Amino acid sequence: MTETRTITGNRGLMVEERLIFEYDHQNRTAVDVPAVEPYEDRLGGLRRKGGVGLPGLAEPQVVRHYTRLSQKNYGIDTGLFPLGSCTMKYNPRLNEKAARMTGLADIHPFQPVSTVQGALELMDTLSHWLKQLTGMPAVALSPAAGAHGELCGVMAIRAAMDARGENRTTILVPESAHGTNPATAAICGYVVESIPAEESGRVSVEAVKAKLGPHVAAVMITNPNTCGLFEPEMIEISRVVHEAGAYVYMDGANFNAVVGRIRIADLGVDAMHINLHKTFSTPHGGGGPGSGPTVLSAALAPYAPVPYVVRDDKGFRLVEHERDAEGDAKPFGRMKGYHGQFGMFVRALAYMLALGKDGLQQVSGDAVLNANYLYARLADVLSASFEGPVMHEALFDDRFLKDTGVTTLDFAKALIDEGYHPMTMYFPLVVHGALLMEPTETESKAALDQFIEAVRGLAERAKAGDAEYFRQAPVHTPRRRLDETLAARKPVLRWTPPQA
Amino acid sequence: MTTLYFTEEHEWIAVDGDVATVGITDFAQGQLGDVVFVEVPDAGKAVSKGKEAAVVESVKAASDVYSPVSGTVTEGNQALVDDPALVNRDPEGEGWFFKVTISGTGDLEGLMDKAAYDAFVASL
Amino acid sequence: MRFLPLTAEDRQAMLAAIGAESVDALYRDVPAAARHPEAIDLPNQKTELQVERAMAALAGKNLNCSQAAAFLGAGNYRHHTPAALDYLIQRGEFLTAYTPYQPEIAQGTLQVLFEFQTQVALMTGMEVANASMYDGATACAEAAAMAQRITKRKKVLVSGGVHPHFADTTDTFLKFTGVDVEILPPDVMGLEDLIGRVDEDLACVIVQTPGFFGHLKDFSALADAVHEAGALLVVATTEPLSLGLLKTPGEMGADIVVAEGQSLALPVGFGGPGVGLFASRSKYLRQMPGRLCGETVDVDGKRGFVLTLSTREQHIRREKATSNICTNSGLVATAFSIHMTLLGEKGFTGLAEYNHARAVEAARRLAAVPGVKVLSSTFFNEFAIAFDKPAADVVEALTAKKVLAGVPASRFYPTYPELDGVLLVAVTEMNSDEDLDALVAGLKEVLS
């Protein structure tokens, strides 16, 4: 039924596109470069001998190649993108316009600071917003993504412990955590111990207490957690962690649920990263770039990495070296090149200014309302894992598929045929066959209702015993299910010229 | 005379005198799905009971294979490195992982026999 | 609010369906002690025009490079962005896609990543490349960590020709795991002896081409010595355009190549975001960090692409992963790849040649200015010059004349007074003859 009968293999708007390397390798280019007059080079005999092996395409060919490839992608602009824990909200075009202003795009990181006062003011303003929105006294802007922000927080914890002369070995991580948490702890030289989840999907003070001891440096806790639930005992958890001499790292991946409504500082948090590419709408097509500013408590603030912006009577300047730190600042080092993800700062600030405090409160409120609406409207056909209300995302497991012969994966693939990007599957690991849906606040009720009808229809079809339909899905996509086993057993990770 | 034992981590171990052959059980390969990569220890490597000795991976999961006994590896099964699917096809035969010379016979205490392992799997 | 589609009526209907009294009621798990939004002191929403004006006001407080003759490099290079590149990268299907976890509806991104990996491998002369890291500096740190995993050794040697941000990031990344990162003093003249420092405790030696001070070196003999000692050679670059003209790191015997890809992907953008390029040898594939895209077939037997070898990564391996990286630089990698395709063989090698020729001409003219000494004997599109007075003062004086003359070495090495007179000067196709005239004339005036 999927057998294509066209001569080309194309199917209307779905056009097959070869690799750029499979075009001819003729002497074309889409970038004309002025000819070079004969000259004496200064390469010291290190001139490249052979060619590079790149193809040669003219501009119209290149534009068509990428236009065709783009048409094989699903994006937020295409449709509802309910990927749990990823906050795939609409990315306003205003962000792009701001980021392309010459005065913000065409400035070099090592111009004299007197010539980039606007850029430094922008970073300082962004810091102000992030500090206000969390109630935290300090923020490190340079981390490049969420996991990098985690690294920033845990390194600050490690530096603080070193300064206290304590050699604590262990970080506690709930088993529902994102994989970056234990991976980050390991990079900082810590052993990871797991905290079991309660039946309710939450972490209890008692479970944390049971694992605490003089060997524990920190607890990393995602809140709202990956089950879409706020940890109701968070304040008490922070209190017992502090009592044990340890620090609280709160993974802020799900900040969108609470932005503008709560103060992170009041939860007793010592460090939390904020994903600008989630909550603050910066685009990250294909998996990045991110930006993970990390807010820090007074206890950890002195250890924030370089560079950071300071303001004095002469204006703004950058502290770029650990040795230039003033006061009680003792930066633990440098996390990346240059001054952080500036282009993301521009976009995030444009977004914040557009929404303002009242708009951001509406963002979190609508995000939570949308998720609860999904939860309520789907509870009778799917299997809700925990009792709500939920925060920004709704977690279901695969009990509703019991004895149907349909798996979570099959169900997700069938949703693709209905025109939707699937929800997050098989994560978190604390429930079986997880389906985690995060609609975000940028979906209308009508769009949610359509999605709900599609999910309900599929659930009924699965229960009616049409397993084969699900196993075949998707059938209306540029490619159907791909053989991941083959890809992993015999890795082909690049094009190679055909053997002559 | 070969005696077969099993662990709760789903390894099997065939013991003949002080020489043992270790692999993963049919149940374990079924749980993993298509095996795409196997790493086995080199001959001469010392392994300890309950410690990681080999790695087996499917597309979506990676598992350590623990040595059920302490001893010295005499051979890793190179055939698995070239053809990881052997673990799926013949887990308790050609799909063995490594052979080891057992340093202490007390190591075998606490391991399950076939009947006990089958009961253990049934209880999961 | 224009980004939020729900109306007051929608909200009421939805609350009724949920059976909740209010949105606030949905927050009942959040402790009341943390719920006081009134403490947040920020302004309310703005129209699009108001935001544009606010952002333009910040932009207006900067002297941007198009308003000056700008010779700035030191790891970030200003090249022309083709119009087609900025158009293609803003297509919503690229801009607003996600990590391609659902390959059936992400073949666009996946094919781009496969082409990107191929381009990076070809440029660097390596066998495999990953789908990107955050930036060059973090890629460098990850390379050192990878060398440590492969060799099981705890010492890393960093050349004084490596960008100091790469060196510092590597040190920060590794110091908590007990790895000793030795960073050699700045190698201004390119005379550093690395071979004499190679020993069997080293996990890797990290070098850079072109060097931070511009020098070009053949690392082949170093590679032999490093391999003899059982260590790895990591070669970094901050100007990937140079690979269009120079002998590749792969040919010199590099085991890992890392690079900052900004120069071919994005405007200088105050230094971020960039894109980390990461390439290596096939035999080290399973120790590589980051995502990898691989070729396969679908159930109909058609060629397609998927993310593969994911068992190395944090979402499966957790604390035993090769890295904690999750989000990478997908969109910037896409921009890089589109630009490389636009350039193609002819444009890439031609633009590299043109950059070098412009830099040679600039060095020739600057050498003739009294009080200027050109320090780099070999270089690509950036070289070091020295004055008898602090370079930072010279830069400041020229900034007043709308000439951004270069980057003073003292910005990176404030504790090396002998570098106070050193200036890094980068010359690309963006620098017109008039720019060069302004630089030469400005220097003559300031130095006289």
Image: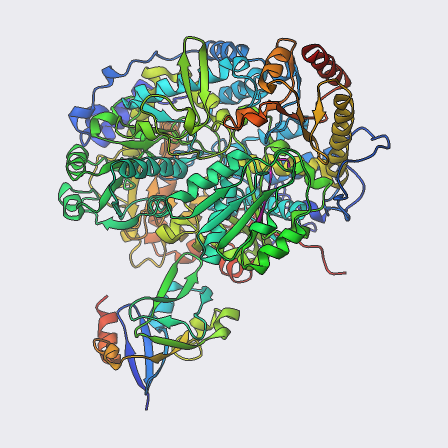
Q: How is the image coloured?
A: rainbow
Q: Is residue A209 left or right of residue C201?
A: left
Quadrant of the image containing the C terminus of chain A: bottom right
Residues C92 and A29: in front is: A29
Q: Residue furthest bottom?
A: B1
Residue appearing at x 75%, y 45% in the figure: A48
Whether residue A194 is situated above or below residue B2 in the rendered picture: above
Q: Which residues are magenta?
A: C234-239
Residue B123 percent coordinates (x, y): 21, 68
Q: Is residue A454 left or right of residue C444?
A: left
Residues A489 and C408: in front is: C408
Residue C134 percent coordinates (x, y): 50, 38
Q: Main secondary structure of the magenta part?
A: strand
Residues A319 and A95: in front is: A319
Quadrant of the image containing the N terminus of chain A: bottom right
Residue appearing at x 66%, y 50% in the figure: C125
Residue C312 percent coordinates (x, y): 44, 54
Residue C16 percent coordinates (x, y): 23, 27
